[in-house]
Image: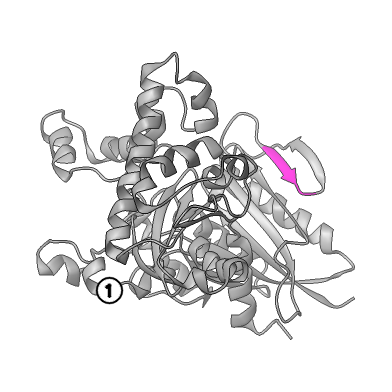
Amino acid sequence: MNTDWILALNCGSSSIKFALFQAGQRRLPRQPAWGGKVQGIGQARPVLDLSDAPSQPVALDATHPNTTALELILERVQQHIAGQGRLAAVVHRVVHGGQRYFAPTRVSAALIDALRALIPLAPLHQPFPLKAMSLILAQHPTVAQVACFDTAFHQSTAQVEQMFALPWSAWQADVRRYGFHGLSYDYMAHALPERHGEAARGRTIVAHLGSGASLCAMHGLKSVATTMGFSALDGLMMGTRCGAIDPGAVIYLMQEQGLGTEAVARMLYHDSGLLGVSGVSPDPRELLPLETTNERVRLALALYVHRIVREIGALTAVLGGLDMLVFTAGIGEHNDVLRARICAPLAWLGVQLDGAANAAHAPVIASGASRVIVGVEPTNEEWMAATQASELLGLGD
């Protein structure tokens, strides 16, 4: 069987997610034919999770754990498709494309060098897909590679939405609001009209709530505004990231408490958010059972919800009203308690939940009396990236 396969990679510092899609069809199947993830990279007990097998421990090189994890994935992929065709393409989720890269782009050594210059804009995310690109380029030069950018979806926002009130030289130096989670929001622009019809083209806010978190205001299925800005630190409170913060607080930490740039970066990226406030965990699933006995945990969850509600209000003002609110990503899709807490203060907008539907994580969780459609829609960044790669490379029918 001469089948072309597309491998979608989402490479992070401690995990690599992968999904394998069969190309050659007019539209790629929404669900991958096979996939999984290596998690715990750089930690004591990394594991390999496959969609068709139990979790299993893996041994990774202590000096280059990300590289050996990727090599393990590529080896397993080749074994899985042996006799079923060829690996035609690898598509990478890249967080930052800067002001130059918006459309899906063929990977080359020159592209890798250009994207490497953007590492300071996304130090948690940017380096790892670039390592994967370099390795595949060296070891599998005949396999086409495509980079898809999380910043691309927000190019539709107006210039005034992208600007900071800094000297004009900062704008000329590309210091601006980029926005992220674009592959997730792009998928919503495909999935929501399929489920909700023309209603999805109205004034919609999508809440991508995972370990990273952001909101996107959409109208006509295009981004109008988003909470993340120049970096993936801005906007909502997250698992370990601070979200929006007064720049004066950063100046104070550096000038008065003597923290250097590396210490401040570690604080804002790794030691803040739910973890920093609670002192316990970045995961709401671990925090919710503790909130009645631990005041810091209670405050962490209250602040998390408050920041989301506040930003929904701001984006509603930008949209001029709200027709639809959609929750997606790990927390958004699976945590009915936090969804209920977020929606309760939005009653003034006409938001009313159906408790049973919310508890069941139904596609529509609004009650019949709600003036706003409230939905839960699983995201599918891997399919979005694979679809973009298939279109760029002409792998479909």
Name the foreground residue: 134 vs 201. 201
Which residue is pictured at 33% across the width and 63% down the height? 321
**Where is residue 198 shown, x and y percent of the image?**
52, 74
Which residue is pictured at 73% across the width and 66% down the height? 21
For residue 208, say whether it is visible. Answer: yes
Q: Does the magenta stretch include residue 102?
A: no
Majority secondary structure in the magenta region: strand
Position of the C terminus by quadrant = bottom right
**Where is residue 330 shown, x and y percent of the image?**
56, 45
Which residue is pictured at 37% across the width and 31% down the height? 302
**Where is residue 381 shown, x and y percent of the image?**
58, 61
- Report the span colored magenta: 47-51
**Which of the 4 quarters of the picture holds residue 380?**
bottom right
Vertical placement of 111 versus 261: above or below? Answer: below
Q: Tag 1, which secondary structure? A: loop
Label 1: few (<14), some or many (≥20) within 10 Å? few
Name the foreground residue: 25 vs 41. 25
Q: In this view, does 247 lie to the left or right of 363?
A: left
Name the foreground residue: 221 vs 4. 221
Which residue is pictured at 30% across the width and 52% down the height? 313
Q: Name the residue under label 1.
A: 158
* Amino acid at pointer 1: Ala
Vertical placement of 304 versus 381: above or below? Answer: above
For residue 229, say whether it is visible. Answer: no
**Which of the 4 quarters of the picture holds residue 385?**
bottom right
- Residue at the limit of the structure toward the front, as seen here: 369
Position of the N terminus by quadrant = bottom right
**Where is residue 364 shown, x and y percent of the image?**
58, 54
